[in-house]
Structures are given as C-alpha cells and as structure tokens.
Amino acid sequence: MEELKVEKAIQDIYPDDIAWCYGCGRLNDDGHHLRTGWHGDKTITIYTPESKYMGIPGFIYGGLIASLIDCHGTGSAALALHRKNGHEIGDGAEPPRFVTANLNVDFLKPTPQHVPLKAIGTVEEIHPKKWKVETEVYAQDTLCARGTVVLVVMPSTFLNKND
Ligand SMILES: CCCCCCCCCCCCCC(=O)SCCNC(=O)CCNC(=O)[C@H](O)C(C)(C)COP(=O)(O)OP(=O)(O)OC[C@H]1O[C@@H](n2cnc3c(N)ncnc32)[C@H](O)[C@@H]1OP(=O)(O)O
C-alpha cells in the first residue's frame, strides 16, 4: 500500500471542550492523537502504536485495535455529517460530535508492531442522528481487523459534567 498522510483531520477542528478523548483528543497529552480525514469517498486514520501496546512481543494488543476502530468511527461520522451539512475542514464551521453506541471487532490476523496501521472507513447514514462506519485495519498490505461502529450524535448532557 502506498505511503499516506492525513493532511486535514476532523479532530484538528473539534472545539476544545471535546478535544480530550484519550484516543483522538488533540489536547490530551497522554493520548493517541488519532487523526481522521477523507481518503477519496472513504475515511482514513494512520497510526503507529508505541512499543508498550503489545499483546505478545511483536504484536499489538487487541484493545488498542478496538480503540483505533472506535475513534476512527467517531471521526468518520463527524466528517460525513459535516460534509452533508455543506462544510469542509477549514471553512470555520464547527463539526458535529458523535459518541459510540456500539462497537464490534473481528480480529482477523495478528497485528504486527512497529509498522503504521491504516484504518480505512466506509460511512453509512442510518438517519441524521445515527451513522454506521465499517472499518478495515491494515498493517502494510495485510488486513488485520475489521470493525463496525454505530455512532449517535452526542447528547448535550455529555458536556459540562464536571461543572
Ligand atoms: C466521553 C465522550 C465524550 C464525547 C466526545 C465526543 C467527541 C469526541 C469523539 C471521541 C469519542 C471517542 C469514542 C468514545 O469513547 S464515545 C464514549 C463511549 N460512548 C458512550 O459513552 C455512549 C454512552 N451511551 C449513551 O450515551 C447512549 O446510550 C447513546 C447516546 C449512545 C444513545 O442514547 P439513547 O438510546 O438515549 O438515544 P436515542 O434514544 O436518541 O437513540 C439514538 C439511536 O441510537 C440507537 N442506539 C442506542 N444504543 C444503541 C446501541 N447500543 N447499538 C445500536 N444502536 C443504538 C437507538 O436505537 C436510536 O436509534 P433509532 O431508534 O433512532 O434508529
């Protein structure tokens, strides 16, 4: 697979109050900083896990793969609804926010460490508040995992929980 880079990511424009997710929040110093952008009509997140995220030496542990699919799903749904609303990253509009309602992962092959993982997503609208993202995770050219995420537009009750 060719070398790819995510130039414009939806997480780059999340408002500060929702930019703290351990998986994809740009403001969480300890997090993974996953970034999701368009890749043709599909979506892409590229991430090389640090060595500590091992299951057995040489291979990534499954929870990290699930996190990648999870945050790739929220980012992909946000990208798609943002575009449906007539916006693109960089036009100044605030993107929609999604939370995960359901996450399913099939671990197809052991996922090797020390190579970039590519999550490629296909986004489907179920209805305006509910979206589904089918994601394939590749290590180099090997399809290692496949996941399905159901996303729901974030209820306003998620904000200001610590006030
Ligand atoms: C902590 C995160 C903060 C937020 C950050 C956001 C941005 C950052 C992004 C990073 C985040 C990273 C990722 C994270 O970590 S996000 C954090 C992990 N996710 C959560 O904490 C979500 C917890 N769950 C809820 O708050 C509620 O259950 C939700 C909001 C999901 C639905 O609540 P509720 O049920 O009251 O809402 P509704 O009645 O209007 O239903 C709406 C539609 O949803 C359908 N449905 C419901 N459940 C399921 C299910 N299990 N499978 C399939 N579908 C389900 C339901 O049938 C309906 O469909 P329809 O009948 O209309 O067709």
Image: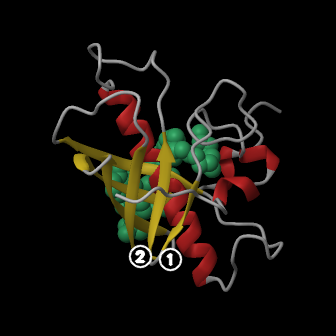
Question: Which secondary structure, mark 2?
Answer: strand
Q: Mark 2 or mark 1, which is nearer to you?
A: 2
Residue receiving disc 1: 128
Q: Position of residue 130 (x, y in %)?
A: 45, 67
Question: Which residue is at the far bottom?
Answer: 86
Name the residue at 72% across, 27% down.
29
Depicted 127 relative to depicted 153: above or below: below
**Res 144 seen here:** yes
- Residue 31 locus on image (x, y percent): 62, 29
CB atoms of marks 2 and 1 within 8 Å: yes
The image quadrant where one finds the C terminus is top right
118 lies left or right of 162: left
Label 1: how many Cα within 10 Å (few below 14, some 14–19, many 20+): few
Q: Give the residue type that dot 2 points to.
A: Glu
39 versus 15 height, above or below: below
Disc number placed over residue 67 in the picture, else none: none
